[in-house]
Amino acid sequence: MPHPDLILTPTGPALAPRYELPAAHRAAEAGHALEAGRAEARSPANPYLRLFTIPGARAFTLGNLLGRLPAGMFGVSSVVMIAGVYGSYALAGAVSAAGLVVGALTAPWIARLVDRHGQARVAVPATVWAVLGQLTLLLCAHAHAPVWTLFAATMTTATAPNTGGMSRARWAHLLRDDPDARHTANAFEQAADELCFMLGPVLAAFLCSALFPEAGTLVAAAFFLTGMLIFAAQRATEPPVAPRTSAGSPLRAPGMPALLAVFLAAGAVFGAMEVVTLAYVDGPAAGPVLALQAAGSCAAGLVYGHARRSAGLASCLGVMAALMALPLPAALTGSLLALAGALLAAGAAIAPTMLTGMALVQRLTPPSQLNEGLTLAVTALLGGVAAGSATGGWLAEHAPAPTYGFLVPPAAAALALAVCAATGTGRRARR
């Protein structure tokens, strides 16, 4: 008989015997513990590799990456295609801008439908419609149709779902009980964004020049549809549709409007830097030089995601404001190599800032509206990109020298930091 234990009963303390488990039960528990230990030992040490040990993670990531790459291809492809037929880059840019604006307006509504009805049920028909719109635009341009048909066709492409947001929502569902792994997954998604927007334009330009002007749009449409079908087929990893709530739009969540204002100012950083760099370099080297910024962001995002700690949004914005000031003195030297190095360093601030901001969006947004909340952040970024592009382009053209345009990115980053500090955005989200 083993040692007795003292327990409390309705009549007071009493001694109760503690019996050992039967030998069969002890053996079973030992076997489970041994198997758990073996599974942990087999788990990769790299946190990114551990993500893809989750069943279904590899398949939905492959589909999402294939479907996300065209986001960096469609714009360049349409500009080359329309300019080649109509002989006007102004028209090509206007058509591309119109599609961007309409897409930014419709994206939150598409995301709301995804939240209410499920990713596969909404994303597949929305993607099919968007692809048909791209093919219609291709046919109109190829046939040299009236100009108004180009604008009408590009507006039908506005149903394209936010593939990056849906992928982040899947990770948030799969890793809801593991904040460290969720941080790593968000870092991977941010690095994937940078990679797609770095490779997409290069691939599109190559296809349009090496084959025929419509090749970029055709390949991008095929990638988009195929990737989304692969992504949507992984139903086991799809987040369940949450019950509807009366919370209304995520815009009503406390702290969300201020956070979106930060995203708006941050978007101006990216839009201005792109236009100003293109205006300064003004040649075939502009693309590779600008791609270094995305490369720096991609690398920094992967390193940041490997860490188990995350910085505050204000700290990230402060670093961004400092690093975005580097291209100006580099450009004043007249050295293209110096500018390339400065852009590489400046890009290192992008992914950690976006990763931290998107993590705050996830905290502020109710789980039943996560796709809509993430898409609102992307919409704010796109609005900032448009404003930054216009401001940087005007300054680069009308200032005494194009280098003055490099004043806009650090100024926009400082504005984002001021908004964050004044509203206490990061502190509010952490509470």
Image (cartoon, grey):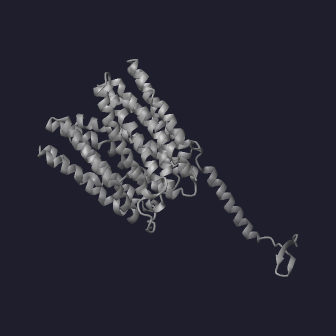
The image quadrant that residue 46 belongs to is top right
Tell me, yes or no, if residue 49 can be seen here: no
Establish if 362 lies above or below 337.
below
Identify the residue at horizontal 14%, vertical 44% (top origin): 142
Viewer-closest of 251 and 11: 251
Q: How many marks?
A: 0
Please give the name of the residue rendered at 31% of the width and 25% of the height, measured from the top-left corner. 399
Where in the figure is residue 169, as x and y percent of width and height?
45, 56
Residue at 50% of width from left, 49% of height from top?
A: 359
Q: Nearer the viewer, residue 290 or 2?
A: 290
Please, which residue is most extreme toward the front here?
A: 422
Percent position of residue 83, x then y: 18, 37
Q: Is residue 335 left or right of residue 126?
A: right
In the image: residue 40, left or right of residue 347: right
Who is closer to the viewer here, 378 or 254? 254
Q: Picture coordinates of residue 180 (x, y %)? A: 58, 49
Q: Is 210 on the left or on the right of 72, as rendered?
A: left
- Image quadrant holding the N terminus, namely bottom right
Report x, y in % for residue 158: 28, 52
Vertical order, 19 against 417 (above or below): below
Q: Please give the name of the residue rendered at 37% of the width and 52% of the height, measured from the top-left corner.
A: 162
